[in-house]
Amino acid sequence: MYKSTILILGGGVGGIVTANHLRKNLPEDYKIILIEKNKEHSLAASYLWLLVDKRTPSQISSPLKMLVSIGVEIIYEDIQKINAEEKFVSLSNRNIKFDYLVISLGADLENVELQKDSKGTDVYSFYTLENSIKLRDRLKNFKGGKIVVMVSSLPYKCPGAPFEAAMLISDYYKKKSANAEASIFTPEPQPLPVAGPQLGQAVIDLLTSKQINFYPHHKIVTVDTLNKELLFENKNSYAYDLLITIPNHKAPNVVIESGLTNESGLPAGQAGWIPVDRNTLETKFENVFAIGDVTTIQLPGRWNPDRPMNLPKAGVFAHSQAIFVSDIISARLLNKKHPKDFCADGFCMLEAGEELAGFAYGNFYGEPNPDVKLKQLGKIWHISKVLFEKWWLAPIGFTKELYKQLMTIGSKLFGVQIKL
Ligand SMILES: Cc1cc2nc3c(=O)[nH]c(=O)nc-3n(C[C@H](O)[C@H](O)[C@H](O)COP(=O)(O)OP(=O)(O)OC[C@H]3O[C@@H](n4cnc5c(N)ncnc54)[C@H](O)[C@@H]3O)c2cc1C
Protein backbone atom coordinates (compact mmCIF):
# COMPACT_ATOMS: atom_id res chain seq x y z
CA MET A 1 0.00 0.00 0.00
CA TYR A 2 1.46 3.33 -1.07
CA LYS A 3 1.21 6.50 1.04
CA SER A 4 0.47 8.64 -2.04
CA THR A 5 0.43 8.40 -5.82
CA ILE A 6 2.00 11.09 -7.95
CA LEU A 7 1.05 10.98 -11.61
CA ILE A 8 3.15 12.71 -14.26
CA LEU A 9 1.58 13.23 -17.68
CA GLY A 10 4.02 13.45 -20.60
CA GLY A 11 7.50 11.94 -20.77
CA GLY A 12 9.21 14.82 -22.56
CA VAL A 13 11.61 17.31 -20.97
CA GLY A 14 9.40 18.34 -18.03
CA GLY A 15 8.05 14.85 -17.36
CA ILE A 16 11.44 13.11 -17.35
CA VAL A 17 13.00 15.66 -14.99
CA THR A 18 9.95 15.59 -12.65
CA ALA A 19 9.99 11.79 -12.47
CA ASN A 20 13.71 11.61 -11.70
CA HIS A 21 13.70 14.39 -9.11
CA LEU A 22 10.65 13.07 -7.33
CA ARG A 23 12.21 9.61 -7.16
CA LYS A 24 15.36 11.14 -5.66
CA ASN A 25 13.32 13.16 -3.14
CA LEU A 26 10.79 10.57 -1.99
CA PRO A 27 11.04 7.19 -0.24
CA GLU A 28 9.80 4.10 -2.07
CA ASP A 29 6.41 4.04 -0.36
CA TYR A 30 5.37 6.97 -2.56
CA LYS A 31 4.30 5.74 -5.99
CA ILE A 32 5.47 7.70 -9.02
CA ILE A 33 3.87 6.97 -12.38
CA LEU A 34 4.89 8.54 -15.70
CA ILE A 35 2.47 8.26 -18.65
CA GLU A 36 3.82 8.84 -22.16
CA LYS A 37 2.56 7.70 -25.56
CA ASN A 38 6.02 7.26 -27.21
CA LYS A 39 8.61 4.68 -26.15
CA GLU A 40 11.42 6.57 -27.86
CA HIS A 41 12.55 10.04 -26.79
CA SER A 42 14.55 12.47 -28.94
CA LEU A 43 16.18 15.74 -27.94
CA ALA A 44 14.51 18.56 -29.93
CA ALA A 45 17.44 20.96 -29.50
CA SER A 46 19.57 18.53 -31.53
CA TYR A 47 17.16 18.49 -34.53
CA LEU A 48 19.00 21.63 -35.67
CA TRP A 49 22.28 19.71 -35.95
CA LEU A 50 20.49 16.83 -37.66
CA LEU A 51 19.26 19.21 -40.38
CA VAL A 52 22.79 20.06 -41.42
CA ASP A 53 23.99 16.47 -41.17
CA LYS A 54 25.95 16.85 -37.95
CA ARG A 55 23.88 14.21 -36.14
CA THR A 56 22.06 11.01 -37.09
CA PRO A 57 18.60 10.22 -35.66
CA SER A 58 20.04 7.48 -33.43
CA GLN A 59 22.64 9.89 -31.98
CA ILE A 60 19.90 12.18 -30.66
CA SER A 61 17.39 9.57 -29.47
CA SER A 62 17.08 7.13 -26.63
CA PRO A 63 14.50 4.68 -25.31
CA LEU A 64 12.58 6.67 -22.68
CA LYS A 65 13.13 3.99 -20.03
CA MET A 66 16.92 4.55 -20.18
CA LEU A 67 16.44 8.18 -19.13
CA VAL A 68 14.09 7.52 -16.22
CA SER A 69 15.15 6.39 -12.74
CA ILE A 70 14.44 2.88 -11.54
CA GLY A 71 11.44 3.03 -9.23
CA VAL A 72 9.33 5.14 -11.58
CA GLU A 73 6.56 3.14 -13.27
CA ILE A 74 6.25 4.10 -16.95
CA ILE A 75 2.95 3.50 -18.73
CA TYR A 76 3.13 3.84 -22.51
CA GLU A 77 -0.36 4.96 -23.44
CA ASP A 78 -2.27 7.80 -25.01
CA ILE A 79 -4.00 9.75 -22.22
CA GLN A 80 -7.72 10.03 -23.00
CA LYS A 81 -9.08 12.23 -20.23
CA ILE A 82 -7.87 14.31 -17.28
CA ASN A 83 -10.32 14.86 -14.44
CA ALA A 84 -8.55 17.33 -12.15
CA GLU A 85 -11.56 17.83 -9.89
CA GLU A 86 -12.16 14.15 -9.09
CA LYS A 87 -8.45 13.37 -9.34
CA PHE A 88 -8.20 10.66 -11.95
CA VAL A 89 -6.81 10.21 -15.45
CA SER A 90 -8.38 7.91 -18.05
CA LEU A 91 -6.43 5.63 -20.36
CA SER A 92 -8.02 3.48 -23.09
CA ASN A 93 -9.35 0.84 -20.68
CA ARG A 94 -8.86 2.07 -17.12
CA ASN A 95 -8.75 5.05 -14.81
CA ILE A 96 -5.76 5.91 -12.62
CA LYS A 97 -6.34 7.89 -9.43
CA PHE A 98 -3.78 10.35 -8.12
CA ASP A 99 -3.05 12.46 -5.07
CA TYR A 100 -0.74 14.81 -6.93
CA LEU A 101 -0.68 15.50 -10.67
CA VAL A 102 2.00 17.11 -12.84
CA ILE A 103 0.89 17.90 -16.41
CA SER A 104 3.77 18.27 -18.85
CA LEU A 105 2.08 17.38 -22.12
CA GLY A 106 3.83 20.01 -24.24
CA ALA A 107 2.36 21.60 -27.36
CA ASP A 108 0.71 19.93 -30.36
CA LEU A 109 1.84 21.15 -33.77
CA GLU A 110 -0.33 21.97 -36.75
CA ASN A 111 0.96 22.85 -40.17
CA VAL A 112 0.17 26.23 -41.62
CA GLU A 113 -2.73 26.05 -44.03
CA LEU A 114 -1.58 25.71 -47.60
CA GLN A 115 -3.59 27.26 -50.39
CA LYS A 116 -2.98 24.61 -53.05
CA ASP A 117 -2.42 20.87 -52.90
CA SER A 118 0.71 20.62 -50.78
CA LYS A 119 1.88 17.31 -52.22
CA GLY A 120 5.31 17.44 -53.82
CA THR A 121 5.88 21.07 -52.95
CA ASP A 122 8.83 22.44 -51.09
CA VAL A 123 7.23 22.97 -47.67
CA TYR A 124 9.13 21.51 -44.74
CA SER A 125 9.56 21.86 -40.98
CA PHE A 126 12.00 20.75 -38.28
CA TYR A 127 9.83 20.66 -35.16
CA THR A 128 9.60 16.85 -34.99
CA LEU A 129 12.29 14.23 -35.59
CA GLU A 130 10.40 12.83 -38.57
CA ASN A 131 10.05 16.27 -40.21
CA SER A 132 13.69 17.11 -39.49
CA ILE A 133 14.82 13.95 -41.30
CA LYS A 134 12.71 14.90 -44.34
CA LEU A 135 14.13 18.42 -44.37
CA ARG A 136 17.71 17.13 -43.95
CA ASP A 137 17.23 14.94 -47.03
CA ARG A 138 15.78 17.85 -49.03
CA LEU A 139 18.58 20.20 -47.97
CA LYS A 140 21.14 17.63 -49.15
CA ASN A 141 19.85 17.72 -52.74
CA PHE A 142 18.72 21.36 -52.86
CA LYS A 143 20.84 23.04 -55.50
CA GLY A 144 20.43 26.61 -54.28
CA GLY A 145 17.91 29.42 -54.37
CA LYS A 146 15.71 31.24 -51.87
CA ILE A 147 15.18 29.49 -48.55
CA VAL A 148 12.57 30.91 -46.20
CA VAL A 149 12.23 30.15 -42.50
CA MET A 150 8.75 31.31 -41.56
CA VAL A 151 7.13 31.60 -38.13
CA SER A 152 3.48 30.71 -38.78
CA SER A 153 2.01 32.10 -35.56
CA LEU A 154 2.73 32.93 -31.92
CA PRO A 155 3.53 31.51 -29.45
CA TYR A 156 6.02 28.88 -30.58
CA LYS A 157 8.53 26.85 -28.63
CA CYS A 158 12.18 27.79 -28.50
CA PRO A 159 12.10 31.40 -29.70
CA GLY A 160 15.72 31.10 -30.85
CA ALA A 161 15.14 28.08 -33.12
CA PRO A 162 14.16 29.89 -36.39
CA PHE A 163 17.29 32.05 -36.14
CA GLU A 164 19.53 29.11 -35.31
CA ALA A 165 18.09 27.12 -38.21
CA ALA A 166 18.68 29.97 -40.69
CA MET A 167 22.27 30.46 -39.49
CA LEU A 168 23.13 26.74 -39.53
CA ILE A 169 21.58 26.24 -42.98
CA SER A 170 23.34 29.32 -44.33
CA ASP A 171 26.66 28.03 -42.98
CA TYR A 172 25.96 24.58 -44.50
CA TYR A 173 25.55 26.01 -48.01
CA LYS A 174 28.49 28.37 -47.58
CA LYS A 175 30.70 25.32 -47.00
CA LYS A 176 29.22 23.69 -50.10
CA SER A 177 29.74 26.95 -52.05
CA ALA A 178 26.10 26.77 -53.10
CA ASN A 179 24.17 29.92 -53.84
CA ALA A 180 21.46 29.84 -51.20
CA GLU A 181 19.84 32.97 -49.79
CA ALA A 182 18.16 32.57 -46.40
CA SER A 183 15.36 34.83 -45.11
CA ILE A 184 13.34 34.77 -41.89
CA PHE A 185 9.74 36.00 -41.76
CA THR A 186 7.98 36.38 -38.41
CA PRO A 187 4.99 38.26 -36.94
CA GLU A 188 7.29 39.30 -34.06
CA PRO A 189 8.72 42.85 -33.94
CA GLN A 190 12.28 41.56 -33.35
CA PRO A 191 14.12 38.30 -32.58
CA LEU A 192 13.40 37.00 -29.06
CA PRO A 193 11.19 39.96 -28.04
CA VAL A 194 11.03 38.80 -24.43
CA ALA A 195 14.78 39.36 -24.08
CA GLY A 196 14.52 43.04 -24.98
CA PRO A 197 15.63 45.39 -27.77
CA GLN A 198 19.39 45.20 -27.14
CA LEU A 199 19.52 41.44 -27.42
CA GLY A 200 17.19 41.53 -30.41
CA GLN A 201 19.52 43.97 -32.19
CA ALA A 202 22.52 41.74 -31.39
CA VAL A 203 20.75 38.83 -33.14
CA ILE A 204 19.82 41.04 -36.12
CA ASP A 205 23.50 42.11 -36.41
CA LEU A 206 24.53 38.48 -36.36
CA LEU A 207 22.02 37.64 -39.11
CA THR A 208 23.20 40.61 -41.18
CA SER A 209 26.83 39.50 -40.87
CA LYS A 210 25.76 36.20 -42.40
CA GLN A 211 23.72 37.85 -45.19
CA ILE A 212 20.47 36.45 -43.78
CA ASN A 213 17.45 38.68 -44.43
CA PHE A 214 15.16 39.36 -41.48
CA TYR A 215 11.55 40.45 -41.97
CA PRO A 216 9.72 41.25 -38.69
CA HIS A 217 5.98 42.16 -38.50
CA HIS A 218 5.13 39.59 -41.19
CA LYS A 219 2.04 37.54 -40.39
CA ILE A 220 1.32 34.90 -42.99
CA VAL A 221 -2.09 34.82 -44.65
CA THR A 222 -1.58 32.42 -47.55
CA VAL A 223 1.05 29.96 -48.68
CA ASP A 224 0.55 29.53 -52.41
CA THR A 225 2.41 26.27 -52.93
CA LEU A 226 1.73 26.10 -56.67
CA ASN A 227 3.42 29.42 -57.40
CA LYS A 228 5.70 29.10 -54.36
CA GLU A 229 4.67 32.44 -53.02
CA LEU A 230 3.96 33.76 -49.52
CA LEU A 231 1.30 36.41 -48.98
CA PHE A 232 1.37 38.37 -45.75
CA GLU A 233 -1.22 40.37 -43.81
CA ASN A 234 0.69 43.61 -44.55
CA LYS A 235 0.12 42.85 -48.30
CA ASN A 236 3.79 42.01 -48.93
CA SER A 237 4.54 38.87 -50.92
CA TYR A 238 7.68 36.80 -51.36
CA ALA A 239 8.62 34.06 -53.80
CA TYR A 240 10.54 31.11 -52.32
CA ASP A 241 12.24 28.00 -53.60
CA LEU A 242 12.20 26.12 -50.30
CA LEU A 243 9.89 26.93 -47.39
CA ILE A 244 10.61 25.90 -43.80
CA THR A 245 7.73 26.62 -41.44
CA ILE A 246 7.60 26.85 -37.68
CA PRO A 247 4.19 25.17 -37.26
CA ASN A 248 1.21 26.55 -35.36
CA HIS A 249 1.23 25.46 -31.71
CA LYS A 250 -1.73 24.51 -29.53
CA ALA A 251 -2.33 22.60 -26.30
CA PRO A 252 -3.06 18.87 -26.81
CA ASN A 253 -6.80 18.14 -27.17
CA VAL A 254 -6.86 16.07 -23.98
CA VAL A 255 -5.75 19.20 -22.10
CA ILE A 256 -8.27 21.50 -23.81
CA GLU A 257 -11.08 19.03 -23.05
CA SER A 258 -10.02 18.84 -19.37
CA GLY A 259 -11.30 22.35 -18.69
CA LEU A 260 -7.88 23.41 -17.40
CA THR A 261 -7.06 25.84 -20.20
CA ASN A 262 -7.76 29.55 -20.56
CA GLU A 263 -10.79 30.61 -22.57
CA SER A 264 -10.42 32.35 -25.90
CA GLY A 265 -10.57 36.14 -26.09
CA LEU A 266 -7.40 36.64 -24.03
CA PRO A 267 -4.22 38.31 -25.37
CA ALA A 268 -2.20 36.24 -27.86
CA GLY A 269 -0.29 33.45 -26.19
CA GLN A 270 -2.61 33.05 -23.22
CA ALA A 271 -5.79 31.62 -24.73
CA GLY A 272 -5.93 27.84 -24.99
CA TRP A 273 -3.06 27.09 -22.57
CA ILE A 274 -3.08 26.15 -18.87
CA PRO A 275 -2.76 29.20 -16.61
CA VAL A 276 -0.76 28.49 -13.45
CA ASP A 277 0.25 30.53 -10.43
CA ARG A 278 3.61 31.87 -11.60
CA ASN A 279 5.16 31.39 -8.14
CA THR A 280 3.95 27.84 -7.39
CA LEU A 281 3.04 26.47 -10.87
CA GLU A 282 -0.19 25.12 -9.40
CA THR A 283 -3.38 25.17 -11.49
CA LYS A 284 -6.78 26.23 -10.15
CA PHE A 285 -7.02 22.75 -8.60
CA GLU A 286 -5.06 22.03 -5.42
CA ASN A 287 -2.13 19.64 -5.92
CA VAL A 288 -2.56 19.72 -9.69
CA PHE A 289 0.49 21.35 -11.29
CA ALA A 290 1.29 22.15 -14.90
CA ILE A 291 4.74 22.88 -16.32
CA GLY A 292 6.50 23.49 -19.61
CA ASP A 293 5.05 24.31 -23.01
CA VAL A 294 1.44 23.50 -22.07
CA THR A 295 1.28 26.42 -19.63
CA THR A 296 0.87 30.15 -20.02
CA ILE A 297 2.58 32.42 -17.52
CA GLN A 298 2.32 36.17 -17.84
CA LEU A 299 5.57 37.89 -16.88
CA PRO A 300 5.54 40.57 -14.17
CA GLY A 301 7.82 42.82 -16.26
CA ARG A 302 7.44 44.15 -19.81
CA TRP A 303 9.40 46.25 -22.32
CA ASN A 304 6.40 48.14 -23.64
CA PRO A 305 3.71 49.19 -21.12
CA ASP A 306 0.98 48.23 -23.61
CA ARG A 307 2.36 44.81 -24.41
CA PRO A 308 2.19 42.06 -21.76
CA MET A 309 4.56 39.14 -22.32
CA ASN A 310 4.54 35.47 -21.48
CA LEU A 311 7.30 33.17 -20.30
CA PRO A 312 8.78 31.60 -23.46
CA LYS A 313 8.04 27.98 -24.22
CA ALA A 314 11.48 26.42 -23.79
CA GLY A 315 13.04 23.25 -22.46
CA VAL A 316 15.12 25.24 -20.00
CA PHE A 317 11.92 26.37 -18.23
CA ALA A 318 10.20 22.98 -18.47
CA HIS A 319 13.37 21.65 -16.78
CA SER A 320 13.61 24.21 -13.95
CA GLN A 321 9.85 24.09 -13.35
CA ALA A 322 10.06 20.29 -13.07
CA ILE A 323 12.72 20.54 -10.35
CA PHE A 324 10.70 23.21 -8.55
CA VAL A 325 7.41 21.28 -8.67
CA SER A 326 9.13 18.08 -7.50
CA ASP A 327 10.45 20.00 -4.50
CA ILE A 328 7.03 21.50 -3.68
CA ILE A 329 5.28 18.12 -3.91
CA SER A 330 7.97 16.41 -1.83
CA ALA A 331 7.81 19.17 0.79
CA ARG A 332 4.03 18.86 1.05
CA LEU A 333 4.18 15.08 1.30
CA LEU A 334 7.00 14.96 3.82
CA ASN A 335 5.79 18.00 5.83
CA LYS A 336 9.01 19.83 5.15
CA LYS A 337 9.70 23.51 4.57
CA HIS A 338 8.17 24.77 1.36
CA PRO A 339 10.69 25.88 -1.30
CA LYS A 340 10.86 29.57 -2.21
CA ASP A 341 8.81 30.86 -5.14
CA PHE A 342 9.72 29.75 -8.68
CA CYS A 343 12.33 32.21 -9.95
CA ALA A 344 12.33 31.86 -13.80
CA ASP A 345 16.09 32.09 -14.29
CA GLY A 346 16.76 30.80 -17.78
CA PHE A 347 19.42 30.54 -20.44
CA CYS A 348 19.75 29.81 -24.13
CA MET A 349 22.75 28.78 -26.21
CA LEU A 350 22.02 30.24 -29.64
CA GLU A 351 23.77 28.19 -32.34
CA ALA A 352 25.24 30.51 -34.98
CA GLY A 353 27.03 28.06 -37.29
CA GLU A 354 30.81 27.57 -37.64
CA GLU A 355 30.65 25.77 -34.26
CA LEU A 356 30.00 29.05 -32.47
CA ALA A 357 27.10 29.98 -30.21
CA GLY A 358 25.85 32.97 -28.26
CA PHE A 359 24.69 32.67 -24.68
CA ALA A 360 21.71 34.60 -23.29
CA TYR A 361 20.79 34.24 -19.64
CA GLY A 362 18.96 36.01 -16.86
CA ASN A 363 15.86 36.41 -14.76
CA PHE A 364 12.70 36.38 -16.87
CA TYR A 365 10.60 37.46 -13.88
CA GLY A 366 12.74 40.63 -13.64
CA GLU A 367 10.99 44.00 -13.20
CA PRO A 368 10.35 46.46 -14.72
CA ASN A 369 11.46 44.18 -17.57
CA PRO A 370 13.09 40.75 -17.89
CA ASP A 371 16.77 40.99 -16.98
CA VAL A 372 18.45 39.07 -19.81
CA LYS A 373 22.12 39.45 -20.74
CA LEU A 374 24.07 38.21 -23.74
CA LYS A 375 27.61 36.81 -23.61
CA GLN A 376 29.84 37.22 -26.64
CA LEU A 377 29.66 34.63 -29.40
CA GLY A 378 32.12 31.84 -28.65
CA LYS A 379 33.06 28.22 -29.11
CA ILE A 380 32.60 27.58 -25.39
CA TRP A 381 28.79 28.03 -25.60
CA HIS A 382 28.65 25.60 -28.53
CA ILE A 383 30.68 23.08 -26.50
CA SER A 384 28.34 23.64 -23.54
CA LYS A 385 25.35 22.80 -25.72
CA VAL A 386 27.07 19.62 -26.93
CA LEU A 387 27.85 18.69 -23.31
CA PHE A 388 24.24 19.30 -22.33
CA GLU A 389 23.11 17.02 -25.18
CA LYS A 390 25.48 14.29 -24.01
CA TRP A 391 24.27 14.62 -20.42
CA TRP A 392 20.61 14.59 -21.41
CA LEU A 393 20.84 11.52 -23.65
CA ALA A 394 23.18 9.47 -21.42
CA PRO A 395 21.39 6.60 -19.68
CA ILE A 396 20.86 6.99 -15.94
CA GLY A 397 24.12 5.95 -14.28
CA PHE A 398 27.82 6.72 -14.05
CA THR A 399 28.35 8.48 -17.42
CA LYS A 400 25.37 10.76 -16.86
CA GLU A 401 26.72 11.70 -13.43
CA LEU A 402 30.13 12.44 -14.98
CA TYR A 403 28.64 14.82 -17.56
CA LYS A 404 26.64 16.47 -14.80
CA GLN A 405 29.80 17.10 -12.78
CA LEU A 406 31.57 18.51 -15.86
CA MET A 407 28.68 20.89 -16.56
CA THR A 408 28.45 21.98 -12.94
CA ILE A 409 32.18 22.77 -12.80
CA GLY A 410 32.05 24.52 -16.20
CA SER A 411 29.06 26.67 -15.26
CA LYS A 412 30.79 27.76 -12.03
CA LEU A 413 33.93 28.69 -13.97
CA PHE A 414 31.91 30.90 -16.33
CA GLY A 415 29.77 32.41 -13.58
CA VAL A 416 26.50 30.90 -14.79
CA GLN A 417 24.04 29.10 -12.53
CA ILE A 418 22.78 25.80 -13.94
CA LYS A 419 20.69 23.32 -11.95
CA LEU A 420 20.43 19.87 -13.56
C1 LIG B 1 13.86 22.35 -33.04
C2 LIG B 1 13.73 22.66 -31.58
C3 LIG B 1 14.83 23.13 -30.88
C4 LIG B 1 14.72 23.45 -29.53
N1 LIG B 1 15.82 23.90 -28.87
C5 LIG B 1 15.71 24.25 -27.58
C6 LIG B 1 16.84 24.77 -26.86
O1 LIG B 1 17.94 24.88 -27.40
N2 LIG B 1 16.66 25.15 -25.57
C7 LIG B 1 15.45 25.05 -24.95
O2 LIG B 1 15.34 25.43 -23.79
N3 LIG B 1 14.36 24.54 -25.60
C8 LIG B 1 14.47 24.15 -26.88
N4 LIG B 1 13.38 23.65 -27.53
C9 LIG B 1 12.06 23.59 -26.85
C10 LIG B 1 11.92 22.36 -25.97
O3 LIG B 1 12.12 21.18 -26.71
C11 LIG B 1 10.51 22.34 -25.37
O4 LIG B 1 10.24 23.60 -24.82
C12 LIG B 1 10.42 21.27 -24.28
O5 LIG B 1 10.51 20.00 -24.87
C13 LIG B 1 9.12 21.41 -23.49
O6 LIG B 1 9.01 20.36 -22.57
P1 LIG B 1 7.58 19.81 -22.14
O7 LIG B 1 7.81 18.76 -21.13
O8 LIG B 1 6.69 20.93 -21.83
O9 LIG B 1 7.00 19.17 -23.49
P2 LIG B 1 7.60 18.01 -24.38
O10 LIG B 1 9.05 17.85 -24.18
O11 LIG B 1 7.13 18.29 -25.77
O12 LIG B 1 6.89 16.71 -23.83
C14 LIG B 1 5.51 16.48 -23.96
C15 LIG B 1 5.29 14.98 -23.99
O13 LIG B 1 3.92 14.69 -23.81
C16 LIG B 1 3.59 13.58 -24.63
N5 LIG B 1 2.14 13.59 -24.87
C17 LIG B 1 1.40 14.59 -25.44
N6 LIG B 1 0.10 14.24 -25.45
C18 LIG B 1 0.00 13.01 -24.90
C19 LIG B 1 -1.08 12.13 -24.62
N7 LIG B 1 -2.35 12.43 -24.93
N8 LIG B 1 -0.80 10.94 -24.01
C20 LIG B 1 0.47 10.61 -23.70
N9 LIG B 1 1.53 11.40 -23.93
C21 LIG B 1 1.30 12.58 -24.53
C22 LIG B 1 4.40 13.82 -25.89
O14 LIG B 1 4.58 12.62 -26.62
C23 LIG B 1 5.70 14.36 -25.32
O15 LIG B 1 6.66 13.36 -25.10
C24 LIG B 1 13.47 23.27 -28.88
C25 LIG B 1 12.37 22.78 -29.59
C26 LIG B 1 12.49 22.47 -30.93
C27 LIG B 1 11.31 21.91 -31.66
Image (cartoon, helix red, strand yellow):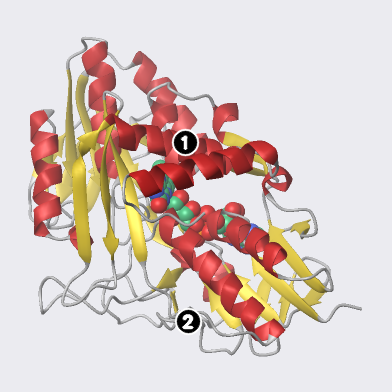
Mark in front: 1 vs 2: 1
Q: Amino acid at mark 2?
A: Thr
On the rendered structure, is 276 left or right of 186? right
User: Of residues 391 and 353, which is closer to you in this image?
Assistant: 391
- Residue drawn at x 37%, y 39% is 117
Image quadrant assignment for residue 76:
bottom right
* Residue placed under numbered mark 2 in the picture: 280
From where the camera sits, is residue 224 visible? no
Q: Which mark is residue 286?
A: none
- Residue drawn at x 65%, y 77% is 330
On the rendered structure, is 321 left or right of 79? left
Q: Is mark 2 within 8 Å of ligand 1?
A: no
Q: Position of residue 152 (x, y in %)?
A: 28, 52
Please, which residue is most extreme toward the top here?
177
Q: Amino acid at mark 1?
A: Leu
Gap in angstroms between the C-alphas marked 1 and 2: 30 Å
* Residue placed under numbered mark 1 in the picture: 387
User: Of residues 391 and 245, which is closer to you in this image?
Assistant: 391
The relative height of residue 270 versus residue 407 in the rendered view (above or below) is: below
Q: Position of residue 15 (x, y in %)?
A: 60, 60
Query: Label 1's element?
Result: helix
Q: Residues within 10 Å of mark 1 (few under 14, many from 20)?
A: some
Q: Position of residue 37 (x, y in %)?
A: 68, 54
- Residue drawn at x 14%, y 52% is 199
Image quadrant assignment for residue 343:
bottom left
From where the camera sits, is residue 106 visible? yes
The relative height of residue 275 versus residue 254 in the rendered view (above or below) is: below
Q: Position of residue 186 (x, y in %)?
A: 19, 50
On the rendered structure, is 347 left or right of 419? left
